[in-house]
């Protein structure tokens, strides 16, 4: 007799009120409401989790111990599906007692509802279209090889740039969107390595934030936790920093 694996029952991620608590902005902005049809999710006391099935990525929000419990439950129920996770900071240590967690990276999920103070160089920011994709790719490859989003990505609604006196790009950035919810996400902000320290990144970031807040009412971004210059800039622009996260892979899955 062939065994049958039952998928977990889809739960309502918003029954606990976690999305209104400090540290749960990723749930509030990153999980769509109403629930997308067919999304697999889990809920427990103090945490919730939901699956981006095409990527095999499990998202979790809440208290680390409770979140770790949900990640474990999910990996046991769907062992061939879940390959990576994002969860509250500290979850990776708890998971490491039971699973082989590799390549953990500490991130901060940041957000703002307010327009930032005006930056004098914002007037230099220009929208770019698909005719500039090759130029953008070459610029990002040279000055930000680890960029998160590239030209041509279906998630990007807007590319912007700043040009020098010779007409060449000296900075660029994109307004992308969070998977599932479609929330505005600033991404791939980069500055010419030879012209850093002149406020170009700050001007472009300020412009993109203002655009997103006026159009959508808020803006979000991911920041590497150990990036002190970015931390100072985003704090100055009014981005909240209440959501310390960790992302990692589950080895062998």
Image: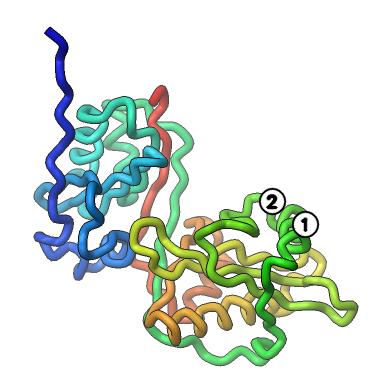
Disc 1: which residue: 138
Residue at the far top in the pictured view: 1
Circle nearer the viewer, 2 or 1? 1
Q: Residue 166 location in percent, x, y?
A: 90, 78
Q: Residue 127 location in percent, x, y?
A: 66, 78
Instruction: Write down the quadrant of residue 123 in the picture.
Output: bottom right
Q: Residue 154 location in percent, x, y?
A: 53, 58
Return the disc, 2 or 1, that comes first in the chain's sequence. 1
Residue depicted at x 49% and y 86%:
116
> In this figure, which colouring scheme has been used for the structure?
rainbow
Mark number displayed over residue 212: none
Q: Nearer the viewer, residue 224 or 10?
A: 10
Q: CA distance from mark 2 to mark 1?
A: 10 Å
Quadrant placement of the N terminus: top left
Q: Is residue 117 above or below residue 34?
A: below
237 sits left or right of 12 in the view: right
Name the secondary structure under disc 1.
helix
Residue at the far right in the pictured view: 166
For the residues bearing labels 2 and 1, Cβ distance under 8 angstroms: no
Instruction: Write down the quadrant of residue 253 in the picture.
Output: top left
Name the secondary structure under disc 2.
loop
Q: Is residue 7 above or below residue 116?
A: above
* Label 2, residues with CA under 10 Å away: few <14, some 14-19, many ≥20: few
Q: Nearer the viewer, residue 203 or 15?
A: 15
152 sits left or right of 197 in the view: left
Q: How many marks?
A: 2
Residue depicted at x 20% and y 44%:
65
Q: Residue 35 location in percent, x, y?
A: 21, 58
Residue depicted at x 15% and y 37%:
8
Disc 2: which residue: 145
* Label 1, residues with CA under 10 Å away: few <14, some 14-19, many ≥20: few
Q: Is residue 144 above or below residue 70?
A: below
């Amino acid at each position: 007799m062939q065994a049958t694996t039952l998928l977990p029952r889809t739960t309502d991620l918003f029954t606990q009120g976690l999305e209104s608590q400090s540290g749960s902005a990723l749930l509030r902005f990153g999980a769509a409401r109403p629930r997308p049809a067919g999304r697999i999710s889990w809920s427990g006391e103090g945490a919730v989790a939901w699956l981006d099935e095409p990527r095999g990525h499990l998202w979790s929000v809440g208290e680390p111990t409770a979140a770790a419990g949900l990640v474990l439950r999910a990996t046991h129920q769907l062992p061939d599906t879940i390959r990576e996770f994002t969860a509250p900071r500290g979850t990776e240590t708890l998971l490491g007692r039971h699973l082989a967690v590799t390549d953990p990276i500490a991130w901060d999920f940041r957000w703002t509802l307010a327009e930032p103070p005006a930056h004098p160089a914002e007037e230099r920011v220009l929208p770019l279209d698909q005719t500039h994709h090759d130029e953008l790719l070459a610029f990002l490859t040279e000055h930000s090889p680890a960029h998160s989003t590239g030209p041509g990505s279906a998630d990007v609604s807007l590319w912007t740039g700043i040009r020098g006196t010779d007409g060449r790009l000296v900075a660029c950035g994109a307004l992308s969107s969070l998977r599932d919810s479609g929330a505005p996400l600033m991404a791939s902000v980069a500055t010419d390595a030879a012209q850093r320290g002149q406020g170009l990144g700050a001007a472009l970031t300020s412009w993109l934030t203002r655009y997103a807040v006026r159009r959508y009412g808020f803006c979000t971004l991911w920041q590497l936790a150990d990036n002190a210059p970015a931390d100072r800039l985003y704090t100055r622009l009014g981005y909240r920093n209440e959501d310390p996260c960790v992302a990692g892979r589950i080895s062998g899955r």
